[in-house]
């Protein structure tokens, strides 16, 4: 029942190799338990010898902190490959498309894209938190998804203002001024069971452009209300979403008219 749910570790475990540092690999027990032959240190001078097509995972923040090392390392891959960037709050900026100068790179799939996607540069969602976190417990999701969804509430709003305070405190104040009730913090099971009863939910950006809240809404048939960015605009073509230029633009009385219609 949870096979359709996106998580970063699912993307990572589906890849043949992981690029990072030991401290990144060891942080997640499921990744730590993988064979060491799949783990490639970003500080290595050459990539392991491969003779067939491979999928390579890399933590997104490596683009910011070690782009040249990553480029040089990938330039030693001797066969065609696809890159996946995930499990980080870091963005994929326009300048990182320099990676397409690598002769054997076919495509890039990345979270938190902050430039125009194309047929070779494809956004992927942050999805739900990884299983090592309380808010990544898929057993809770199995329980919640078994229940029929009944929409008895209007707009859900509660989020941690401390996560990107500059953006979220502003959003919080605007939403509060519009008279939308602010919910109380609860455990993950109670939160999901409450969220599923709402038609809409406020989804401000956090440390990254994409949010777990967006995907929790998608899986619970709740329409996320977001600011426009490359991620939200891309996924509004696949899921019902309300996109705003600024939070002041939220028109509660005409909200039903603002939902994006996904492409068939």
Image: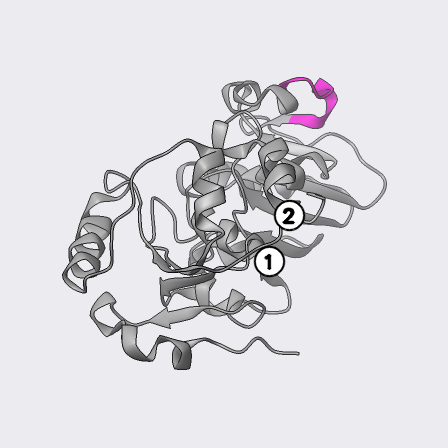
Decide if residue 163 is on the left or right side of residue 96: left
How would you rate the neighbour count of disc 2 (Cα within 10 Å): few for under 14, some for 14-19, many for 20 or more? many
> Which scheme is used to colour this image of the protein?
one colour
Residue 38 covered by magenta stretch: yes
Query: What is the span of residues highlighted in magenta in the rendered image?
Result: 32-39
Quick one: quadrant of the C terminus? bottom right
Q: Is residue 33 above or below residue 259?
A: above
Q: Work out whether residue 44 or residue 8 is closer to the camera in this orientation and state it.
A: 8
Q: Is residue 241 visible?
A: yes
Q: Position of 175 compared to 6: left or right?
A: left
Q: Foreground residue, 110 or 223?
A: 223
State the residue at coordinates (29%, 40%): 184
Q: Which residue is mark 2?
A: 83
Per the image, label 1 sits on a secondary structure element best described as helix
Instruction: Report how far apart the C-alphas of labels 2 and 1 lie in the structure.
Output: 10 Å
The x and y percentages for residue 94 are 44, 60
Discs 2/1, front: 2
* Count of residue discs: 2
Q: Is residue 195 magenta?
A: no
Q: Quadrant of residue 17?
A: top right
Out of 14 and 218, give the one closest to the viewer. Answer: 218
Q: Residue at x 59, y 58 (%)?
A: 100
- Label 2 element class: strand
Q: Position of residue 44 (x, y in %)?
A: 59, 26
Q: Which residue shows up at 68% across the image and 55% down it?
A: 103
Where is mark 1, residue-wise?
A: 100
Spot the residue most to the right. Answer: 51
- Badge 1 local density, few (<14 within 10 Å), some, or many (20+)? some
Q: Is residue 116 above or below residue 55?
A: below
Q: Which mark is residue 42?
A: none
Above or below residue 263? Residue 25 is above
Which quadrant holds the N terminus? Answer: top right
């Amino acid at each position: 029942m949870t096979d359709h749910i996106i998580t970063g570790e699912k993307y990572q475990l589906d890849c043949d190799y992981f690029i990072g540092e030991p401290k990144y690999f060891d942080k997640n027990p499921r990744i730590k338990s993988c064979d060491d032959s799949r783990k490639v240190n970003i500080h290595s001078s050459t990539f392991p010898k491969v003779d067939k097509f491979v999928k390579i995972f890399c933590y997104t923040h490596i683009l910011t902190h070690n782009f040249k090392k990553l480029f040089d390392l990938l330039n030693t891959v001797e066969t065609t490959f696809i890159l996946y960037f995930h499990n980080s709050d870091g963005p994929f900026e326009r300048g990182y498309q320099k990676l397409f100068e690598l002769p054997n790179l076919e495509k890039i799939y990345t979270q938190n894209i902050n430039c125009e996607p194309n047929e070779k540069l494809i956004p992927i969602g942050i999805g739900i938190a990884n299983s090592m976190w309380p808010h990544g417990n898929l057993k809770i999701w199995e329980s919640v998804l078994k229940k029929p969804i009944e929409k008895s509430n209007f707009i859900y709003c509660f989020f941690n203002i401390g996560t990107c305070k500059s953006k979220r405190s502003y959003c919080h104040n605007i939403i509060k001024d519009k008279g939308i009730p602010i919910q109380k913090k609860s455990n993950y099971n109670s939160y999901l069971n409450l969220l599923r009863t709402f038609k809409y939910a406020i989804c401000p950006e956090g440390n990254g452009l994409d949010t777990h809240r967006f995907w929790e809404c998608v899986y619970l048939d709740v329409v996320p209300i977001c600011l426009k960015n490359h991620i939200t605009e891309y996924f509004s073509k696949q899921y019902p979403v309300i996109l705003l230029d600024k939070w002041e633009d939220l028109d509660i009385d005409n909200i039903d008219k603002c939902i994006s219609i996904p492409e068939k």
